[in-house]
Image (cartoon, helix red, strand yellow):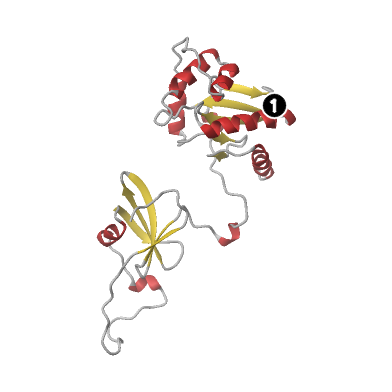
Amino acid sequence: MKLIGQVIFLSVLISASFSASPSFSFEGAGCGQDCASCHSLAREEAGKMLKIDVSSIANAPAKGLWEVDGFQNGKKVKVYIDYGKKYAILINAFIPIENIGKPPELRKIDLNMIPLTDALVIGNPSAKKKVIVFTDPDCPYCRKLHGEIKELLKDNTDIVFYIKLFPLINIHPESYEKSRSILCKKSLKLLDDAIEGKSLPKAECNTKAVDENIKLAERLSINGTPTIILPDGSLIPRFVDKQTLLKLMEQQQSTN
């Protein structure tokens, strides 16, 4: 069974054989009201079922399930197995019923950890609402967000965006040199050119700002672009349109 990390609810039938017991089966120990008292799952057994290296097994927050943590191809996975050992469920998290319909709880970052001296500034530098964006010039969703930012600023002069160039070298190998070229001149024009797919001149300095941004993203556990950080430090790890971005900012402001 191949586990796919981005799937939210994936149920996979695990074949199991049961021997029919003769006559009645009242003999032996019984189970109490706690189902966990009469069900067990060993690491080796779970590993064979799921084809992963199991690191730990515990009772899941929802009754009737085990929570299995492990690794597959060097990546962490979390899987839930029902007590009948017939189904494996791969999910990101359990959601309390009372939280359904409410806006998602966003991870927060200490804004003091993010230096802005090397950031490109889009919007009114004296605006009170500061939004930080980690972006990659060759990222398609970053290009979409760049356009949304410009549209948003046409009607909102109280917001300023600080752009931190964070090239994803493994998938966009040319974005590193583009980012260096942009930051050498701290040029919004060059950023626009890169977003539009135009070729850029070679970097005219030996800036270390791009490397520092890559290290900073690693420290903050930011591993994708675009990543948006709202004025209160709330992190949005994906593209959102201007209406959604404004709504999220309003929601975070109302809860603070």
**Coordinates of residue 4 in the picture (x, y in percent):** 40, 50
> In the visual, does 61 lie left or right of 116?
left
Rendered position, 147 above or below 57: above
Q: Nearer the viewer, residue 116 or 103?
A: 103
**Residue found at the very far right of the displayed protein:** 155
- Residue 47 position by quadrant: bottom left
Left or right side of 247 for 35? left
What percent of the width, then of the height, locates residue 157?
73, 28
Q: How many marks?
A: 1
Seen as rendered, the residue at the extreme top is 204
Task: From this view, report whether residue 58 is shown above or below residue 53.
Answer: below
Residue shown at the point (44%, 30%) measured from the top left: 168
> What percent of the width, then of the height, locates residue 199?
50, 17
Q: Residues within 10 Å of mark 1 (few under 14, many from 20)?
A: few
Location of the N terminus by quadrant is bottom left
Residue at 44 percent across and 19 percent down: it is 177
Q: Quadrant of residue 13?
A: bottom left
Q: Amino acid at mark 1?
A: Ala
The residue wearing badge 1 is 127
Q: Please tell me which residue lies in front, 219 or 248.
A: 248
Q: Quadrant of the C terminus?
A: top right
In the rendered image, residue 153, in percent from the top left (x then y), is placed at: 69, 29
Q: Is residue 95 visible?
A: yes
Look at 56% across and 30% down and name the residue there: 143
Q: Which secondary structure, mark 1?
A: loop
Is there any visible trace of residue 130 in the rendered image? no
